[in-house]
Amino acid sequence: MRVAFPYMGDIRLVLEPILRELGAEVVVPPEPNRETVALGAQLAPETICLPFKVTLGNILRALELGADTLAYVSGSWSCRFGYYGRLQADICRELGYRFRLLELRRDRMKEIIREILQLSDNSLLRATGRAWRAFRLGWFKATTLEKAYELSRQVLPQAENKQECRRLLRTVIAEIETAEKVRELKQIRDRLTTRFARVRRNGRGSVLRVKLIGESYCTIEPFVNFDLINRLGEMEVWVDPFLTGPRWLGFHGFRLRKGEVRRAQRLAKSYWQYCVGGEDANSVGHLIMAARAGYDGVIHVHPFACMPSTVVQPALAAASRDYNIPLLSISLDEHTAEAGFLTRVEAFVSLLERRRRSSFKTGGEVYVPDQGE
Amino acid sequence: MAVVGIARSLHSYHHFTLWRAFFEELGWQVVLSSRTDRQTVEQGVKLAPAELCLPVKVFLGQVARLLEQVDYVFVPRLVCRRLKGDFYFGCPKAIALPDLVRAIFPEQKGRILELVIDQQIQRDEVGFVRCAKALGVDRQCAQGAFQQAKKAEAEAGKLRVHGPSPADCFPPERLNSKPGAGRGKIGVIGHPYLIYDEHISLNLLRMIAELEIEPVIPGIGEEELIQEAGRALNWYYELELIAGARKLVREAQVDGLLLVSSFACGTAPVVNELIRREVAVRTGLPMLTLLFDEHSGETGLRTRLESFADLIRSRK
């Protein structure tokens, strides 16, 4: 079985070792690029959301590389995401590719378990052992990655040489990718703090803090959000995304940290009562949490015409008004130009800077004293 | 006696009879908002985020107008229905409608009357009872009214002569479509709140009839919908569209299919793609997709329809 799954940020760094340990051969397509997106956009229905087009282009590359099984999270709910697998499979078959579609849905858990068993020649003992090893490795990969990202997000705005910090992050990710044993990962993880601490700082005491919320694909995949987290870091803004690749897998794949999700949804309750998809309730909840935690602003990214993210916008705006926190909402599609996107982000950042300065003068609520300027 | 306003858009085209009967049974006066016009659209466009689909913008425009006229505005939340054991959902916008309205009219929160239809967690009756509770009506009264309303809905269904069309649920709605002189039939597939709204769809049906082509709109009853359940789609109101397309191809001998949807409608790309694959490609029927938004112009539409009509005639 040569299995491929849709590409989304760094999820492959966790998912690939898990599947490999389970006994499957994994085909990882190259990162999304202009070509694959153009290919996806050409074949996809015109007004479907951006993640569909990006993943379609990538899945086609994976099929070219010889994948014979496509694994999709899918299901019956209101958001279009549930239809990705079925529609993309239809489109690929029309192009002449032959493969098997493996739909990972909650009502088909039995089939999925049978599939995993088959990979281990139907030996339950062997399968259990493999599964344990797989998830243990996946867990350590995810937590190590998560810690590396977190440190990099924190250090980058204050680094004297931004490239030094970004280089370090790239090195660390490469190390995590090649690490095969839990022991190695633990070593990497333990040394992360000291390694990032060694990056030279520019001495400015405090930086702007921004929360990144929105639809998961746009939040996680640097190709579609123009590497927003690092770009903001270079503008000396400390970004805190509410969702990262490993966290997405944790929340949605394995139902971890339900408490946090529930807390966000409880906070969102007075603005948003039914969760429809596209991380709508979570976005509202995290906006409120960010306001309470004294963040300077919130950026909401979502694909153009994403149903839940579009309809949630008035609620986000209402919450941002009520909690007095600036909000920038940007929709992305395959035609979004980097320059236009970054101009809007830069304008938002200077708004936040001015806002912080003026509230400092007037003695308004400032959580981190601005010593640098 | 207070007045409850119902917007003439979205799923009112499906359920107006039921909703009206329920409130009237409780002794409330029901006001249906006036037909969509330019002002409704303009107001909706001003209120809504730019990326929303036109029908929701129209809905918001009508709610804004109703808020000036009535005591309470009825806003349904159509989450989920059950067909043959499977759950079928409303589109995210239909599910989020009350939240959307409350976020846009924050001062009017108390005047929004919310009805939740979610057969995952409760029977429809419970939803109606809760809705009536907000008006201070007790449980038994509300239950009785719901039963009566259900009866009224069933009766209205029986009275329909030309097959169950959602537009029949409305008090006299002129379709203005004189039957064509047998020079071809076009099946029109689209949400009723698009094709029956003469302002949004720019009088599409009449325009087709003027080309001496008969527009055929499939009426899909509950039983037919159940037949189609279990297929590829998990949206309730969109299942109706696919069922309609299949039925038209099977029974009505149409010469072409017209898929009507609005720009930024989230379900349309998926539904139209499925219909294209399943119906049009397999049977070789000509198909035209029309997208409507607040900038649609009549001339452009007429040109496209005329050439589609020519295509159909040349194939005959």
Image (cartoon, grey):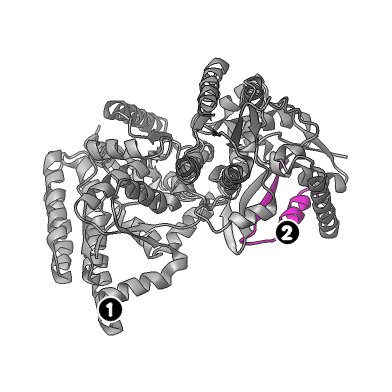
In the picture of the structure, the residue carrying the numbered disc 1 is A127
Query: Disc 2 on helix, strand or loop?
Result: helix
> With respect to residue A186, does B63 lie above or below?
above
> With respect to residue A171, does B306 lie above or below?
above
In the picture of the structure, the residue carrying the numbered disc 2 is B126
Would you say B72 lies left or right of A190 here? right
Would you say A137 lies left or right of B157 here? left
Residue at the limit of the structure toward the front, as seen here = B316
Q: Are marks 2 and 1 on the same chain?
A: no
Is residue B121 in the magenta section? yes
Crowdedness near tag 1: few (<14), some (14–19) or many (≥20) residues, C-alpha within 10 Å: many
> With respect to residue B247, does B257 lie above or below?
above
Spatial CA span between label 2 and label 1: 47 Å
| Residue stretch in magenta | B112-136
- In the figure, residue B251 lies in which quadrant? top right
Q: Position of residue B305 (x, y in %)?
A: 55, 23
Q: Can the viewer see residue B101?
A: yes
Image mark 1: chain: A
Residue at the limit of the structure toward the top, as seen here = B299
Q: Position of residue A290 (x, y in %)?
A: 42, 46
Quadrant containing the C terminus of chain B in the rendered view? top right
- The amino acid marked with disc number 2 is Val
